[in-house]
Amino acid sequence: MRRPLDLSAHVARSQNGPCFICQLLDGNPDYAHHIIAQDDDSIVFLSKYPTLPGYALVCPKPHYQDLARDMSTTQYLALQGVVHRLSRALSQVFDAERIYVLSLGSAQGNSHVHFHVVPLPKGVPYADQQYHALMAEHGVLDLPDAEMAATAARIAAVYRDLSD
């Protein structure tokens, strides 16, 4: 079941509010997300506004705004290792047809580097895949907090058991 997302409010918060990733890392309860994994350098958590089950984000902990200028090759490759490991976990948990990986944001909003990592369920009609499947304009899943927590725990268990 989907619910509409107030896109105007979401955009305003993204452009004018504090960095949601930094706020999450600082422990601000208004920016709490269901965490899947974290280490000294990165954090993985479920999106608050999922368009597909298992929609997750991978972020470096430092507030890097540009992966080409702010991150070393070593830091970038380490973060991509987290993206790959999460992709493998999501594939197992959701028996996904494909894993979408996308980096969004800019200096104008959602400036903290982050990657959207999203499992595409098998059987989704082609017209409803790709960008269509990721666009909040089509609504976001209305998932109870307990279900989000259980999903994060399932993904986390598989993620922990995977070797690099």
Image: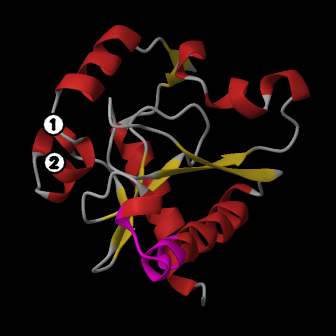
59 left or right of 9?
right
Closer mark to the observer between disc 1 and disc 2 = 1
Vertical relation: 114 (above or below) 130: below
Q: Which residue is mark 1?
A: 18
Give the residue drawn at x 83%, y 33%: 124
- Report if residue 6 is visible in the image: no
Label 1 sits on a secondary structure element that is: loop
Query: Quick check: marks 1 and 2 in contact, CB under 8 Å?
Result: yes
Please tell me whether residue 47 is drawn above or below residue 22 in the rendered image.
above
The location of residue 43, given as percent across then percent down, is: 35, 65
Left or right of 96 in this view: 82: left
Q: Residue furthest front?
A: 69
What main secondary structure does the magenta stretch of the protein show?
Answer: helix
The x and y percentages for residue 101 are 64, 51
Q: Dot 2 corresponds to which residue?
A: 23
Q: Earlier in the sequence, mark 1 or mark 2?
A: 1
Q: Residues within 10 Å of mark 1 (few under 14, many from 20)?
A: few
For residue 132, which quarter of the picture? top right
63 magenta-colored: no
Please give the name of the residue rendered at 79% of the width and 52% of the height, measured from the top-left corner.
Answer: 98
- Name the secondary structure under disc 2: helix
Disc 1 to disc 2, C-alpha distance: 7 Å
Hey, which quadrant is residue 19 in on the image? top left
Residue occupying image coordinates x 71% and y 66%:
92
Residue 107's place in the image compared with 67, above or below, is above
Q: What quarter of the picture does the C terminus occupy?
A: bottom right
Which segment is the magenta one? 70-79
Say which amino acid is labelled 2.
Gln
Residue under the point 42% across and 15% down:
5
Q: Nearer the viewer, residue 84 or 54?
A: 84
